[in-house]
């Protein structure tokens, strides 16, 4: 028996939750490859990104077919078009995990991160994990009360990002220009990863509450 | 007399072309503010970004209403959903112009770009202008033969981006860590700006040819 419209909608949602797991795992492993200067782990993350891209594309095509076939309106249409945008953001989060892994690969066998900053990057990796896992829960449960946590994690990520700038620009920075640039770019990848998770959460809020995307404030949810 | 469906589709397309002009102008002025360390120009770019965001949002809402009201299928649906994605990419290009302007503001009254690199950033600004202007033409005319030019401009932008890395990492780099970081981040903003223009062009190709987005190769168009 072919899946009903409602079942197909649920499958799209399941795919999005699955994507949060994949891009969460990708960023976790990318962080690990960075901290351990682990080339084979970095390459595994890089290879895996095409699977994330393929899943994002499959979700987008399925959403297209659902709109064309069932011509949903109002909230249902908002759910499906929202899912397309969410798939796009998650795909981009996968790219950012790949960027981190590529940075680890580029400097191998050297570590890309100076010893003193390992703790900060481990913390950013942990925040990335927390934020993507809560984003998955928001998609799965539509419980937007989790969004305030996501906003807090994002603020903490921004704080670490600013802190790293202060460190590399301080007169006591004892490494070179290369390490400063690596640190800055890596830090930006984590910060953008968190931004995309925030964007995904805001899309879910627009679906649940009907508020326009630009008006959503996660702190209020 | 209210606009017909076809007229409304054309209005969406006109809005997208208008957005390419706005984000093109924003990046041009941001580059100028950077090269001249012009604070008031930088602030004008920063203030203007909310208008670009508002236009992107208006396009997205209008596309939503068109789908809900007229329930288009096949190519028409692809056009409207493509327009939503294009508006999102153009909005992001506006953000990147804003980032460049913020960098100029941050270092004012100092110039953010070392004298020797002014030429390279002027070139990146020129490429950004060329790429966004051709992207506007592709949207306006649906003439995808222009896409090969866009791909070439993007490759040239990537080359300049790599060249800047080589310069800041060379032993002859006579500036400090701050200038190296500024250069790297600015260079990345231009490179991402071009990437988004490529993404917009690929969306137009999917609309015109029906190819899936992931399969589009602009060099072949």
Image: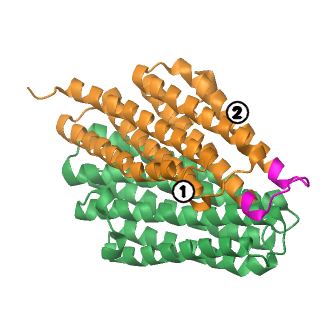
Chain colours: A orange, B green
- Give the x, y percent position of residue B25: 60, 67
Q: Residue at x 58, y 61 (%)?
A: A106
- Give the x, y percent position of residue A195: 58, 41
The answer to whether residue B56 of the structure is visible from this angle is no
Q: Is residue B175 magenta?
A: no
Quadrant location of the C terminus of chain A in the rendered image: top right
Residue pointed to by mark 2 = A156
- Give the x, y percent position of residue A12: 30, 33
Which mark, by number, is residue A211?
A: none
Depth check: A10 or B147 in front? Answer: A10
Classify residue B205 as left or right of residue B18: left
Depth check: A57 or B24 in front? Answer: A57
Residue B179 found in image quarter = bottom right
In the orientation shown, which residue stands out farthest toward the left?
A1
Q: Residue at x 44, y 74 (%)?
A: B150
Figure label count: 2
* Chain under disc 2: A
How packed is label 1: few (under 14 Cα within 10 Å), some, or many (20 or more)? Answer: many
Depth check: A80 or A1 in front? Answer: A1
How packed is label 2: few (under 14 Cα within 10 Å), some, or many (20 or more)? Answer: some
Classify residue A135 as left or right of residue A5: right
Segment tinted magenta in the rendering: A167-179
Residue pointed to by mark 1 = A102
Residue B104 found in image quarter = bottom right
Depth check: A58 or A64 in front? Answer: A58
Q: Which residue is drawn at 54% across and 56% down?
A: A102
Quadrant location of the N terminus of chain A in the rendered image: top left
Q: Is residue A191 above or below residue B160?
A: above
Classify residue B118 as left or right of residue B24: right
């Amino acid at each position: 028996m072919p899946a009903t419209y409602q079942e197909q909608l649920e499958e799209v949602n399941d795919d999005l939750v699955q994507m949060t797991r994949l891009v969460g795992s990708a960023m976790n492993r990318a962080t690990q490859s960075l901290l351990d200067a682990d080339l084979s782990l970095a390459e595994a993350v890089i290879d895996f990104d095409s699977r994330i891209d393929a899943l994002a594309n499959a979700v987008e095509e399925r959403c297209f077919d659902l709109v064309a076939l069932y011509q949903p309106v109002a909230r249902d249409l908002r759910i499906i078009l929202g899912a397309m945008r969410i798939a796009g953001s998650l795909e981009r989060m996968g790219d950012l995990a790949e960027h981190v892994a590529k940075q680890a690969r580029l400097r191998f066998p050297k570590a890309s991160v100076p010893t003193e900053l390992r703790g900060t990057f481990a913390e950013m990796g942990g925040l990335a994990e927390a934020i993507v896992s809560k984003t998955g829960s928001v998609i799965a449960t539509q419980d937007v009360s989790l969004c305030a946590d996501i906003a807090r994690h994002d603020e903490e990520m921004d704080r670490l990002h600013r802190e790293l700038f202060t460190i590399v620009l301080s007169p006591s920075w004892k490494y070179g220009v290369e390490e400063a640039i690596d640190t800055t770019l890596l830090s930006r990848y984590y910060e953008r990863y968190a931004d995309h998770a925030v964007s995904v959460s805001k899309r879910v809020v627009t679906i649940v509450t009907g508020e326009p995307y630009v008006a959503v404030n996660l702190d209020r949810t």
